[in-house]
Image (cartoon, rainbow, N blue to C red):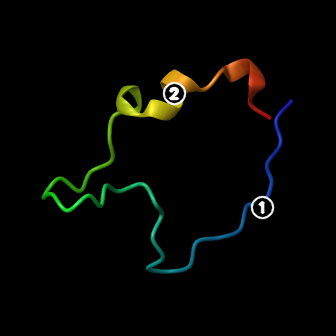
Amino acid sequence: KVQIMDCGELRSGEDWGICENDGTVDVYPAYPEDWDYIRTTDPEKID
């Protein structure tokens, strides 16, 4: 079962929230393997 909820549109120039903003020059998103979400989330419990 797949549910898509609250799927508004991004306005021109709006931040997508995927870039790193930790004060370093590295502004690219992390590899998915580096995200804590993947290691700590049980895929069976995702709504």
Q: What amino acid is at disc 1?
A: Asp
Q: Quadrant of the N terminus?
A: top right
Mark in front: 1 vs 2:
2
Between the C-alphas of marks 1 and 2, the distance is 22 Å
27 relative to 42, above or below = below
Given residues 1 and 34, the one toward you in this image is: 34
Name the residue that disc number 1 marks: 6
Q: What amino acid is at disc 2?
A: Ile
Q: Position of residue 28 (x, y in %)?
A: 26, 51
- Residue 33 placement: quadrant: top left
- Residue 43 placement: quadrant: top right
Q: Residue at x 45, y 70 (%)?
A: 15
| Secondary structure at numbered mark 1 | loop
12 relative to 29, above or below = below
Given residues 32 and 36, the one toward you in this image is: 36
| Secondary structure at numbered mark 2 | helix
Q: Position of residue 46 (x, y in %)?
A: 74, 30
- Left or right: 39 in relation to 27: right
Q: Label 2: few (<14), some or many (≥20) within 10 Å?
A: few
Q: Quadrant of the C terminus?
A: top right
Name the residue that disc number 2 marks: 38
Q: Label 1: few (<14), some or many (≥20) within 10 Å?
A: few
- Left or right: 17 in relation to 6: left
1 relative to 26, above or below = above
Q: Position of residue 13 (x, y in %)?
A: 44, 79
Badge 1 or badge 2: first in the primary sequence: 1
Determine contact: label 1, label 2, CB under 8 Å. Answer: no
